[in-house]
Amino acid sequence: MRTYEFVAPCHFGLESVTKKEVQSLGYEITEVTDGRVCFRGDATAIARANVFLRTAERVLLRVGVVHAETWDELFEQTKSLPWELYIPKDASFWVTKASAIKSKLFSTRDIQSIMKKAMVKRLGEYYGIDWFEEHGAKYPVRVFAYKDEFTVCLDTSGESLHKRGYRLKQGLAPITETLAAALIMLSGWRDDHPFVDPMCGSGTFPIEAAMIAANIAPGMDRAFAAEAWTNIIDKKLWYDALNEANEKIDQNLLETGINKYGKKVDIQGYDVDPAVIPVARENAERAGVDKIVHIQVRDVADFSHKGKYGYIMCNPPYGERIEDKRNLPMLYTELKEAYMGLDSWSMHLITAWENCQKYLGKADKNRKIYNGMMKTYFYSYTKRMTNQNKPHDFGRKA
Protein backbone atom coordinates (compact mmCIF):
# COMPACT_ATOMS: atom_id res chain seq x y z
CA MET A 1 0.00 0.00 0.00
CA ARG A 2 1.31 3.44 -0.92
CA THR A 3 2.72 5.68 1.82
CA TYR A 4 1.66 9.33 2.12
CA GLU A 5 2.80 12.39 4.02
CA PHE A 6 0.12 14.03 6.19
CA VAL A 7 -0.20 17.35 7.96
CA ALA A 8 -2.44 17.71 11.04
CA PRO A 9 -3.01 21.41 11.82
CA CYS A 10 -3.71 22.09 15.49
CA HIS A 11 -3.89 25.02 17.91
CA PHE A 12 -0.65 26.95 18.37
CA GLY A 13 0.86 25.89 21.68
CA LEU A 14 -0.75 22.45 21.75
CA GLU A 15 1.39 20.60 19.21
CA SER A 16 2.69 18.18 21.86
CA VAL A 17 -0.82 16.89 22.54
CA THR A 18 -1.60 16.30 18.86
CA LYS A 19 1.81 14.67 18.38
CA LYS A 20 1.11 12.16 21.12
CA GLU A 21 -2.32 11.43 19.67
CA VAL A 22 -0.82 10.66 16.26
CA GLN A 23 1.82 8.45 17.83
CA SER A 24 -0.86 6.58 19.78
CA LEU A 25 -2.44 5.64 16.43
CA GLY A 26 0.87 4.09 15.43
CA TYR A 27 2.06 6.63 12.86
CA GLU A 28 5.57 8.01 12.45
CA ILE A 29 6.02 11.71 13.21
CA THR A 30 8.17 13.41 10.55
CA GLU A 31 8.08 17.01 11.75
CA VAL A 32 6.47 19.24 14.39
CA THR A 33 6.19 22.98 13.67
CA ASP A 34 4.07 25.83 15.01
CA GLY A 35 0.47 24.74 14.69
CA ARG A 36 1.23 21.59 12.68
CA VAL A 37 2.15 17.96 13.23
CA CYS A 38 3.40 16.05 10.19
CA PHE A 39 3.34 12.28 9.96
CA ARG A 40 3.63 9.37 7.54
CA GLY A 41 1.07 6.65 6.88
CA ASP A 42 -0.77 4.65 4.24
CA ALA A 43 -4.36 5.08 3.04
CA THR A 44 -5.72 3.62 6.28
CA ALA A 45 -4.31 6.70 8.04
CA ILE A 46 -6.73 8.92 6.12
CA ALA A 47 -9.70 7.18 7.70
CA ARG A 48 -8.23 6.45 11.14
CA ALA A 49 -6.78 9.92 11.70
CA ASN A 50 -10.06 11.60 10.75
CA VAL A 51 -12.12 9.30 12.95
CA PHE A 52 -9.84 9.18 16.02
CA LEU A 53 -7.91 12.46 16.36
CA ARG A 54 -9.50 14.69 19.01
CA THR A 55 -7.17 17.68 18.83
CA ALA A 56 -6.31 18.14 15.14
CA GLU A 57 -8.29 20.65 13.08
CA ARG A 58 -7.95 18.69 9.84
CA VAL A 59 -6.07 15.84 8.22
CA LEU A 60 -4.27 17.07 5.12
CA LEU A 61 -2.60 14.86 2.51
CA ARG A 62 0.57 16.60 1.34
CA VAL A 63 0.94 16.68 -2.46
CA GLY A 64 4.28 18.48 -2.35
CA VAL A 65 6.35 21.48 -1.31
CA VAL A 66 7.42 24.04 -3.91
CA HIS A 67 9.54 27.19 -3.87
CA ALA A 68 8.24 30.27 -5.68
CA GLU A 69 9.15 33.94 -5.58
CA THR A 70 7.25 35.06 -8.69
CA TRP A 71 3.81 34.26 -10.08
CA ASP A 72 5.38 32.48 -13.07
CA GLU A 73 7.41 30.30 -10.70
CA LEU A 74 4.32 29.50 -8.67
CA PHE A 75 2.45 28.46 -11.82
CA GLU A 76 5.26 26.27 -13.12
CA GLN A 77 6.08 24.71 -9.76
CA THR A 78 2.42 23.91 -9.08
CA LYS A 79 2.10 22.46 -12.59
CA SER A 80 5.10 20.21 -11.87
CA LEU A 81 3.30 18.43 -9.02
CA PRO A 82 1.82 14.96 -9.88
CA TRP A 83 -1.84 15.99 -9.61
CA GLU A 84 -2.97 13.06 -11.77
CA LEU A 85 -2.01 10.70 -8.93
CA TYR A 86 -4.65 12.31 -6.73
CA ILE A 87 -7.33 14.00 -8.82
CA PRO A 88 -9.49 12.02 -11.29
CA LYS A 89 -10.86 13.34 -14.55
CA ASP A 90 -14.36 14.14 -13.25
CA ALA A 91 -13.26 15.68 -9.93
CA SER A 92 -14.29 19.04 -8.57
CA PHE A 93 -11.08 20.73 -7.39
CA TRP A 94 -10.12 24.19 -6.18
CA VAL A 95 -7.80 25.97 -3.76
CA THR A 96 -10.19 26.48 -0.86
CA LYS A 97 -7.69 28.21 1.44
CA ALA A 98 -4.28 29.84 1.06
CA SER A 99 -2.15 31.59 3.65
CA ALA A 100 1.19 33.36 3.30
CA ILE A 101 3.67 34.46 5.96
CA LYS A 102 6.93 36.28 5.14
CA SER A 103 6.59 35.34 1.46
CA LYS A 104 7.10 37.54 -1.58
CA LEU A 105 3.77 36.28 -2.90
CA PHE A 106 1.26 37.31 -0.29
CA SER A 107 -2.04 37.87 -2.12
CA THR A 108 -4.02 34.80 -1.09
CA ARG A 109 -6.64 35.39 -3.78
CA ASP A 110 -3.97 35.46 -6.52
CA ILE A 111 -2.28 32.38 -5.04
CA GLN A 112 -5.58 30.52 -5.26
CA SER A 113 -6.22 31.64 -8.85
CA ILE A 114 -2.72 30.92 -10.19
CA MET A 115 -2.55 27.50 -8.57
CA LYS A 116 -5.96 26.49 -9.88
CA LYS A 117 -4.89 27.44 -13.43
CA ALA A 118 -1.71 25.39 -13.04
CA MET A 119 -3.66 22.36 -11.85
CA VAL A 120 -6.07 22.65 -14.78
CA LYS A 121 -3.14 22.91 -17.20
CA ARG A 122 -1.38 19.81 -15.83
CA LEU A 123 -4.51 17.69 -15.59
CA GLY A 124 -5.78 18.89 -18.98
CA GLU A 125 -2.58 17.74 -20.65
CA TYR A 126 -2.70 14.41 -18.79
CA TYR A 127 -6.35 13.62 -19.55
CA GLY A 128 -6.29 15.20 -23.02
CA ILE A 129 -9.14 17.64 -22.39
CA ASP A 130 -9.54 21.43 -22.41
CA TRP A 131 -12.51 21.70 -20.05
CA PHE A 132 -13.31 20.06 -16.73
CA GLU A 133 -17.00 19.69 -15.90
CA GLU A 134 -16.08 19.07 -12.24
CA HIS A 135 -19.24 17.15 -11.38
CA GLY A 136 -17.54 14.38 -9.39
CA ALA A 137 -16.05 14.08 -5.91
CA LYS A 138 -14.69 17.20 -4.24
CA TYR A 139 -10.92 17.57 -3.79
CA PRO A 140 -10.31 20.82 -1.88
CA VAL A 141 -6.71 22.06 -1.81
CA ARG A 142 -5.08 24.00 1.05
CA VAL A 143 -1.82 25.90 0.72
CA PHE A 144 0.53 27.26 3.41
CA ALA A 145 3.32 29.59 2.30
CA TYR A 146 6.20 30.47 4.60
CA LYS A 147 9.29 32.31 3.35
CA ASP A 148 8.48 31.42 -0.28
CA GLU A 149 8.05 27.69 0.49
CA PHE A 150 4.54 26.53 -0.43
CA THR A 151 3.20 23.39 1.24
CA VAL A 152 0.42 22.07 -0.99
CA CYS A 153 -2.16 19.68 0.47
CA LEU A 154 -5.46 18.00 -0.26
CA ASP A 155 -7.98 18.39 2.56
CA THR A 156 -9.23 14.90 3.44
CA SER A 157 -11.52 16.17 6.20
CA GLY A 158 -13.75 18.71 4.47
CA GLU A 159 -15.41 20.47 7.38
CA SER A 160 -13.11 21.16 10.32
CA LEU A 161 -12.71 18.24 12.72
CA HIS A 162 -14.02 20.34 15.60
CA LYS A 163 -17.47 19.79 14.10
CA ARG A 164 -18.20 16.50 15.82
CA GLY A 165 -21.91 16.71 15.09
CA TYR A 166 -23.25 16.94 18.65
CA ARG A 167 -23.19 20.70 19.15
CA LEU A 168 -26.08 22.00 17.07
CA LYS A 169 -26.68 24.73 19.64
CA GLN A 170 -24.14 26.74 21.61
CA GLY A 171 -23.73 29.52 24.14
CA LEU A 172 -22.47 33.03 23.53
CA ALA A 173 -18.73 32.33 23.77
CA PRO A 174 -18.17 28.63 23.07
CA ILE A 175 -14.81 26.91 23.05
CA THR A 176 -14.20 24.60 20.08
CA GLU A 177 -14.39 20.88 20.65
CA THR A 178 -10.81 20.30 19.46
CA LEU A 179 -9.40 22.96 21.79
CA ALA A 180 -11.46 21.68 24.73
CA ALA A 181 -10.21 18.12 24.18
CA ALA A 182 -6.60 19.29 23.87
CA LEU A 183 -6.75 21.26 27.13
CA ILE A 184 -8.31 18.33 28.99
CA MET A 185 -5.58 16.04 27.73
CA LEU A 186 -2.91 18.62 28.51
CA SER A 187 -4.16 18.88 32.10
CA GLY A 188 -3.49 15.18 32.70
CA TRP A 189 -7.05 14.42 33.86
CA ARG A 190 -8.14 10.79 34.11
CA ASP A 191 -11.66 9.57 34.65
CA ASP A 192 -10.95 8.30 38.17
CA HIS A 193 -10.85 11.97 39.26
CA PRO A 194 -13.85 14.32 39.51
CA PHE A 195 -14.19 16.79 36.64
CA VAL A 196 -16.21 20.01 36.95
CA ASP A 197 -16.73 22.97 34.63
CA PRO A 198 -18.46 25.62 36.77
CA MET A 199 -19.16 27.84 33.73
CA CYS A 200 -20.04 25.17 31.20
CA GLY A 201 -22.19 27.10 28.74
CA SER A 202 -23.21 24.64 26.02
CA GLY A 203 -21.29 21.87 27.78
CA THR A 204 -18.25 21.38 25.56
CA PHE A 205 -15.70 20.68 28.33
CA PRO A 206 -17.76 18.06 30.22
CA ILE A 207 -18.94 16.43 27.00
CA GLU A 208 -15.41 16.12 25.63
CA ALA A 209 -14.24 14.77 29.00
CA ALA A 210 -16.99 12.16 28.93
CA MET A 211 -16.15 11.15 25.36
CA ILE A 212 -12.52 10.70 26.42
CA ALA A 213 -13.59 8.66 29.45
CA ALA A 214 -15.85 6.39 27.38
CA ASN A 215 -13.30 6.22 24.53
CA ILE A 216 -15.82 7.52 21.99
CA ALA A 217 -13.97 8.50 18.82
CA PRO A 218 -14.83 12.12 17.90
CA GLY A 219 -15.36 11.45 14.19
CA MET A 220 -17.81 8.56 14.41
CA ASP A 221 -20.94 10.53 13.54
CA ARG A 222 -19.85 12.78 10.70
CA ALA A 223 -18.75 12.65 7.07
CA PHE A 224 -15.37 13.45 5.52
CA ALA A 225 -14.38 14.74 2.09
CA ALA A 226 -12.08 11.79 1.38
CA GLU A 227 -14.89 9.25 1.75
CA ALA A 228 -15.61 9.93 -1.92
CA TRP A 229 -11.97 9.56 -3.00
CA THR A 230 -12.24 5.98 -4.18
CA ASN A 231 -9.15 6.45 -6.37
CA ILE A 232 -7.05 6.92 -3.20
CA ILE A 233 -8.81 5.10 -0.36
CA ASP A 234 -11.09 2.08 -0.55
CA LYS A 235 -14.52 2.41 1.10
CA LYS A 236 -13.73 -0.65 3.18
CA LEU A 237 -11.02 1.26 5.06
CA TRP A 238 -13.63 3.72 6.33
CA TYR A 239 -15.82 0.85 7.55
CA ASP A 240 -12.79 -0.72 9.20
CA ALA A 241 -11.99 2.52 11.04
CA LEU A 242 -15.58 2.86 12.26
CA ASN A 243 -15.68 -0.77 13.38
CA GLU A 244 -12.43 -0.22 15.27
CA ALA A 245 -13.92 2.88 16.91
CA ASN A 246 -17.08 1.00 17.90
CA GLU A 247 -15.10 -1.82 19.45
CA LYS A 248 -13.10 0.62 21.59
CA ILE A 249 -16.11 2.31 23.21
CA ASP A 250 -16.45 1.53 26.91
CA GLN A 251 -20.09 0.44 26.81
CA ASN A 252 -20.04 -0.60 30.46
CA LEU A 253 -19.08 2.93 31.46
CA LEU A 254 -21.90 4.41 29.39
CA GLU A 255 -24.43 1.98 30.89
CA THR A 256 -23.32 1.85 34.52
CA GLY A 257 -21.15 4.93 35.00
CA ILE A 258 -18.37 2.67 36.38
CA ASN A 259 -14.96 3.12 34.74
CA LYS A 260 -12.12 0.67 34.16
CA TYR A 261 -10.70 1.58 37.59
CA GLY A 262 -13.92 0.38 39.22
CA LYS A 263 -14.91 3.92 40.20
CA LYS A 264 -18.04 5.92 39.52
CA VAL A 265 -17.29 8.57 36.92
CA ASP A 266 -17.94 12.09 38.20
CA ILE A 267 -18.24 14.62 35.35
CA GLN A 268 -20.29 17.76 35.99
CA GLY A 269 -21.12 21.07 34.37
CA TYR A 270 -22.67 24.11 36.03
CA ASP A 271 -23.78 27.47 34.71
CA VAL A 272 -25.54 30.44 36.27
CA ASP A 273 -27.63 30.95 33.12
CA PRO A 274 -30.65 28.63 33.18
CA ALA A 275 -31.19 29.12 29.45
CA VAL A 276 -28.02 27.24 28.48
CA ILE A 277 -28.64 24.18 30.66
CA PRO A 278 -31.16 22.54 28.26
CA VAL A 279 -28.75 23.28 25.41
CA ALA A 280 -25.87 21.55 27.21
CA ARG A 281 -28.03 18.57 28.12
CA GLU A 282 -29.25 18.26 24.54
CA ASN A 283 -25.67 18.35 23.26
CA ALA A 284 -24.63 15.68 25.78
CA GLU A 285 -27.49 13.47 24.62
CA ARG A 286 -26.47 13.84 20.97
CA ALA A 287 -22.90 12.93 21.91
CA GLY A 288 -24.20 9.79 23.67
CA VAL A 289 -22.84 10.76 27.09
CA ASP A 290 -25.93 12.20 28.78
CA LYS A 291 -26.02 9.36 31.34
CA ILE A 292 -22.52 10.11 32.64
CA VAL A 293 -22.55 13.94 32.45
CA HIS A 294 -24.53 15.85 35.07
CA ILE A 295 -25.43 19.44 34.17
CA GLN A 296 -27.32 21.87 36.40
CA VAL A 297 -27.88 25.54 37.20
CA ARG A 298 -25.44 26.78 39.82
CA ASP A 299 -23.55 29.99 40.49
CA VAL A 300 -19.76 29.82 40.80
CA ALA A 301 -20.09 31.32 44.29
CA ASP A 302 -22.15 28.26 45.31
CA PHE A 303 -19.78 25.67 43.88
CA SER A 304 -18.60 23.00 46.30
CA HIS A 305 -17.65 19.34 46.13
CA LYS A 306 -16.96 16.73 48.81
CA GLY A 307 -14.57 14.68 46.67
CA LYS A 308 -10.78 14.90 46.62
CA TYR A 309 -8.22 15.25 43.82
CA GLY A 310 -10.68 16.65 41.31
CA TYR A 311 -10.21 18.99 38.37
CA ILE A 312 -11.83 22.32 37.63
CA MET A 313 -11.69 23.09 33.90
CA CYS A 314 -13.33 26.20 32.47
CA ASN A 315 -13.42 28.96 29.88
CA PRO A 316 -14.52 31.94 32.00
CA PRO A 317 -15.59 35.30 30.55
CA TYR A 318 -12.78 37.73 29.80
CA GLY A 319 -14.67 40.91 28.95
CA GLU A 320 -14.53 40.68 25.18
CA ARG A 321 -17.97 39.37 24.31
CA ILE A 322 -20.24 38.37 27.15
CA GLU A 323 -19.21 40.25 30.27
CA ASP A 324 -18.26 43.82 31.01
CA LYS A 325 -14.72 43.98 32.34
CA ARG A 326 -15.85 45.66 35.55
CA ASN A 327 -17.65 42.45 36.55
CA LEU A 328 -14.62 40.24 36.05
CA PRO A 329 -12.77 40.88 39.36
CA MET A 330 -15.74 39.60 41.38
CA LEU A 331 -16.24 36.58 39.09
CA TYR A 332 -12.60 35.50 39.25
CA THR A 333 -12.48 36.14 43.00
CA GLU A 334 -15.52 33.89 43.46
CA LEU A 335 -13.84 31.23 41.34
CA LYS A 336 -10.73 31.39 43.51
CA GLU A 337 -12.76 31.16 46.74
CA ALA A 338 -14.65 28.14 45.39
CA TYR A 339 -11.37 26.48 44.42
CA MET A 340 -9.80 27.16 47.81
CA GLY A 341 -12.70 25.38 49.48
CA LEU A 342 -11.92 22.11 47.71
CA ASP A 343 -9.70 19.31 49.01
CA SER A 344 -6.51 18.78 46.95
CA TRP A 345 -8.00 19.79 43.60
CA SER A 346 -6.30 21.33 40.57
CA MET A 347 -7.76 24.13 38.47
CA HIS A 348 -7.22 24.83 34.77
CA LEU A 349 -8.70 27.69 32.78
CA ILE A 350 -8.25 29.41 29.45
CA THR A 351 -8.74 33.16 29.26
CA ALA A 352 -7.62 36.25 27.38
CA TRP A 353 -8.04 38.51 30.41
CA GLU A 354 -4.60 39.87 31.28
CA ASN A 355 -5.47 40.56 34.95
CA CYS A 356 -6.58 37.01 35.66
CA GLN A 357 -3.74 36.16 38.06
CA LYS A 358 -4.30 39.33 40.05
CA TYR A 359 -7.51 37.78 41.39
CA LEU A 360 -6.77 34.04 41.13
CA GLY A 361 -3.18 34.19 42.33
CA LYS A 362 -0.06 33.25 40.41
CA ALA A 363 -0.54 30.09 38.37
CA ASP A 364 1.81 27.13 38.73
CA LYS A 365 1.86 26.77 34.94
CA ASN A 366 1.05 29.32 32.27
CA ARG A 367 0.96 28.43 28.57
CA LYS A 368 0.25 30.81 25.68
CA ILE A 369 -2.31 29.38 23.25
CA TYR A 370 -3.86 30.94 20.17
CA ASN A 371 -7.61 30.39 20.01
CA GLY A 372 -8.02 31.21 16.34
CA MET A 373 -6.39 34.64 16.02
CA MET A 374 -6.92 35.48 19.68
CA LYS A 375 -4.01 35.18 22.09
CA THR A 376 -5.14 33.40 25.25
CA TYR A 377 -3.44 31.85 28.26
CA PHE A 378 -3.99 28.46 29.81
CA TYR A 379 -3.44 28.78 33.57
CA SER A 380 -2.97 25.70 35.72
CA TYR A 381 -3.11 25.62 39.53
CA THR A 382 -1.80 22.21 40.52
CA LYS A 383 0.22 22.45 43.73
CA ARG A 384 -2.80 21.72 45.91
CA MET A 385 -3.06 18.23 44.36
CA THR A 386 -0.59 15.84 45.97
CA ASN A 387 1.95 14.28 43.60
CA GLN A 388 0.86 10.70 44.17
CA ASN A 389 -2.64 11.56 42.97
CA LYS A 390 -1.64 13.42 39.83
CA PRO A 391 -2.35 11.58 36.57
CA HIS A 392 0.42 11.27 34.03
CA ASP A 393 1.31 14.50 32.22
CA PHE A 394 -0.17 14.05 28.73
CA GLY A 395 1.04 17.43 27.54
CA ARG A 396 4.78 17.28 28.08
CA LYS A 397 6.82 19.06 25.45
CA ALA A 398 7.39 17.38 22.12
Image (cartoon, helix red, strand yellow):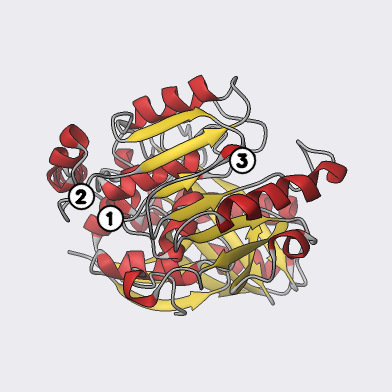
- Residue drawn at x 29%, y 46% is 217
Q: Secondary structure at mark 1?
A: loop
Q: Does residue 94 appear to the left or right of 322 in the view shown?
A: left
Q: Which residue is mark 2?
A: 263
Residue 250, horizontal then vertical, whole percent: 17, 44
Q: 48 above or below 286?
A: below
Give left or right: position of 326 versus 32: right
Residue, disc 1: 192
Q: Position of residue 235 (x, y in %)?
A: 20, 41
| Residue nearer the viewer, 377 or 5 | 377
Residue 253 falls left or right of residue 104: left
Count of all numbered marks drawn on residues in the image: 3
Identify residue type, mark 3.
Val
Where does label 3 land, which residue?
300
- Which image quarter: residue 19? bottom left
Q: In front here: 41 or 17?
A: 17
